Image (spheres, rainbow, N blue to C red):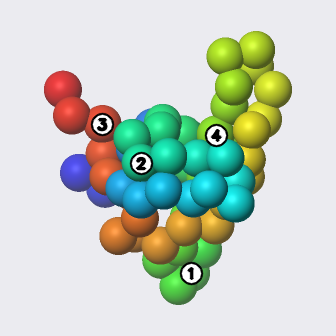
Amino acid sequence: MTIALLTTVVLERDLPEHGLARGDVGAVVEIYEDGAFEVEFVRASGRTQALVELAREDVRLVAS
């Protein structure tokens, strides 16, 4: 499956500088020409926790 805008993805590595851990779930909000993604991670309160540019290998699709 292709990753498109607003696709839900799972983080594949820890990003402690952003307060994120492997397994955190985010949404793709931008796709760049070089294949990188801008992913938004949101707290349970609805506030953005982090907005991070990630490579394809840093995320995976959510399993059914």
Distance between the Cα atoms at labels 3 and 4? 14 Å
According to the image, label 2 marks what residue?
22
Task: Out of 16 and 56, give the one closest to the viewer.
Answer: 16
In the image, is residue 16 above or below residue 36?
A: above
Describe the element under mark 2 as helix, strand or loop: loop
Describe the element under mark 1 as helix, strand or loop: loop
Label 2 Cα neighbours within 10 Å, binned few <14 / some 14-19 / many ≥20: some
According to the image, label 4 marks what residue?
41
Residue 33 numbered mark, or none: 1
Q: Earlier in the sequence, mark 2 or mark 1?
A: 2
Residue 62 numbered mark, or none: 3
Answer left or right for 22 relative to 40: left
In the image, is residue 62 above or below residue 14?
A: above
Q: Position of residue 43 (x, y in %)?
A: 69, 25
Give the residue at x 30% y 36%: 62
Q: Amino acid at mark 3?
A: Val
Q: Earlier in the sequence, mark 4 or mark 2?
A: 2
Q: Are marks 3 and 2 in contact (CB under 8 Å)?
A: no
Answer left or right for 1 relative to 35: left
Distance between the Cα atoms at labels 4 and 2? 12 Å
Q: Are marks 3 and 4 in contact (CB under 8 Å)?
A: no
Viewer can see residue 29: no
Describe the element under mark 3 as helix, strand or loop: loop
